[in-house]
Amino acid sequence: MAEKGEEAKPLGPSAAVYPTETFDEEGAMQWRSAQYLRKRRGVLFCCGCCGVLVVVLGLVALVLALTAFKVKDPVLTMNSIHFSGLRVGGPGPVNATLTADVSIKNPNMASYEFRNSTTELYYGGKVVAVARAPGGEVAAHRTVRLNVTVDVMADRVAGLGIPAVGFLAAGSVNLTTRTEINGRVNMFGVFRRELDVFLNCSMTMDLSLTEQGVKDKVCTMKTE
């Protein structure tokens, strides 16, 4: 019979097809690529935000430094100055007590710290009295007044060769004072500036009064 004569042919190997594994690998690669791009965009976005924030903060700091936080010079003022206890002993030296009222105004947003101040009195171009006041601190937008009292150095007045009689007969005496205050402004530990203030005053002392006052007082201030 034909059926018996025919030999059964073996089945050939089928082609290897793995569609599921291929799709899984491609999906994983696409997922990893998407994750990488997402992270990269996130990093770039964060860096951009940080850069913009730094620029904005820098601009704000610059504006504040040029306006509100700009260090301004303190204002030193000689409010009043007078002499008392003028005594003469015949041809002897002249003795007197100098009292000066000085104020320091701080126009800054931070305090002004100053060290010991010095006030010198000049007569005939020579120092005849020196007063020193202790240091202190002037708060922001505040004014502090210093009262300085010093005795005139009688030996220095005598060293000028001016007799007491001639001193009194003059009726008035031209004097000059020099006040020096050294300090600094500290803006929150960021902006620091050393500020030395000098105040020079010229005046005329009236000898006809019981408490010798001054007139024609002219003062000039400078800072360094």
Image: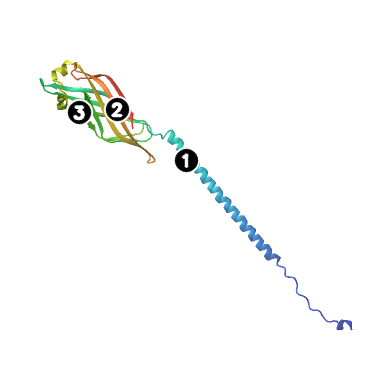
In the image, taking residue 166 as reference, residue 39 lies left or right, namely right
Instruction: Name the residue beneath numbered marker 2.
Output: 199
Give the crowd class for mark 3: few <14, some 14-19, many >=20 residues within 10 Å: some
Q: Nearer the viewer, residue 170 or 16?
A: 170
The quarter of the displayed image where residue 186 is located: top left
Which residue type carries mark 2?
A: Leu
| CA–CA distance in space, label 1 to label 3 | 50 Å
Residue 150: numbered disc: 3
Whether pointer 2 and pointer 1 mark residues with C-beta atoms closer than 8 Å, the reply is no
Q: Residue at x 29, y 27 (%)?
A: 199
Residue 15 position (above or below residue 2) = above
**Going from the N terminus, do you reach mark 2 or mark 1 first?**
1
Q: Secondary structure at mark 3?
A: strand
Q: Nearer the viewer, residue 213 or 195?
A: 195
Residue 48 position (above or below residue 98) = below
Q: Position of residue 144 (x, y in %)?
A: 30, 30
Q: Residue at x 44, y 36 (%)?
A: 64
In the image, taking residue 8 as reference, residue 75 lies left or right, namely left
Q: Position of residue 146 (x, y in %)?
A: 26, 29
Whether pointer 3 and pointer 2 mark residues with C-beta atoms closer than 8 Å, the reply is no
Q: Position of residue 130 (x, y in %)?
A: 21, 29
Which residue type carries mark 1?
A: Gly
Instruction: Indicate the quadrant containing the C terminus: top left, top right, bottom left or bottom right.
Output: top left
Instruction: Name the residue beneath numbered marker 1.
Output: 58
| CA–CA distance in space, label 2 to label 1 | 37 Å
Which residue type carries mark 3?
A: Val
**Going from the N terminus, do you reach mark 3 or mark 2 first?**
3
**Going from the N terminus, do you reach mark 1 or mark 3 first?**
1
Q: Residue at x 50, y 43 (%)?
A: 53
The quarter of the displayed image where residue 145 is located: top left
